[in-house]
Image (spheres, rainbow, N blue to C red):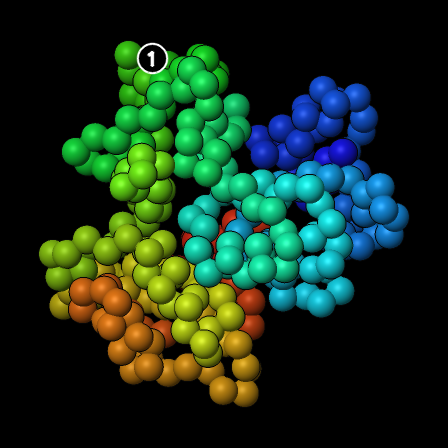
Amino acid sequence: RWVLTLPSSYIAGVQVIVRSLVAGHQPAVVDGFDLTSALGGHDEAPHFLSLVPTQLHRLVGDPAQAPAIARCHTVLLGGGRIDPGLRRRAEGLGIHVVATYGASETAGGCVYDGVPLDGVEVLIGADARVRVRGPVLARGYRLRPDLTAGAFAGGTFTTGDLGRWTPDGRLDVIGRADDVIVTGGENVAAGEVAELLARHPAVAEAAVVGRPDPEWGQRVVAVVVPADPAAPPDLAQLRAFVTAAAAAHHAPRQLVVVDRLPLLPTGKVDREALREL
């Protein structure tokens, strides 16, 4: 059985419903994101779950919820770059995680743990933009031939994501093309910096955005939820931590400390709201 934790107005939620119907049952609907209640407290719990990384992060940190999610057969995790540390932490709790990649235009997930489905071809050009071919593609955008012509040219869908191939031939999605921060003439992938910041022991959650800067064009801004609200990290600590693992231009030049990251209905981080903090 499937557990529905995502809005049914988005493709990931729709696919949970479709998978449930194909399996011959209705999905278990989570009320207030209480997995313990949704799973019913019985051995024959729903087996499959689809989450975004922010949801998984909060679940594994909740002692009341982590045992419930560990009882699921598989957790599909998509909708954003996945921090390897988060995945290891989840798997250490006995949670079987499968990373997914896809979009509404590809009818949801079409790449699983970096491997495309049969019949799906993933291309990465010199611009690092991820492009997809195959029977999973939509025909285009309804009543928008202008958008269709640009995004679906030649039977290939050009996504808004940047990616690369790992040494073993798997797709690694770096982040959104529109999340690249150009600071001092250097390109910085916001998702990669956020992933680094999330590894700092004083940081519970992190996101990164760019803001206009008179000197640098854009400055890298770190928005973090502290692991201990009484002892938040300072900017100097985070800059030193980032520069120990990446080039200096990746280090944040501004720090914003918040109680919680703002989220969209899908559970993804609301980047527009971040820029307004």
- Residue at 54%, 87% (x, y): give it: 230
Q: Quadrant of residue 121?
A: top left
* Left or right, 52 with reference to 193: right
Question: Which residue was labeled with disc 1?
Answer: 155
Of the 4 image quadrants, the one containing the N terminus is top right
In the rendered view, would you say 174 is above or below 217? above
Q: Residue furthest bottom?
A: 230
Residue 247 drawn above or below residue 74: below
Question: In terms of image quadrants, where is residue 216?
Answer: bottom left
Total marks placed: 1
Where is the C terminus found, in terms of image quarters? Answer: bottom left
Q: Is residue 176 in sight in this rendering?
A: no
Q: Residue at x 27, y 78 (%)?
A: 240
Nearest the eye: 248 or 2: 2
* 51 w.r.t. 129: above or below: below
Q: Circle 1: is it few (<14), some (14-19), or many (20+) Cα within 10 Å?
A: some
Residue 184 image point, x, y percent: 13, 61
SS of the residue under disc 1: helix
Instruction: Say left or right for 50 vs 134.
Output: right
Out of 220 and 211, give the one closest to the viewer: 220
Three-letter amino acid code of the residue under disc 1: Gly
Residue 112 percent coordinates (x, y): 48, 34
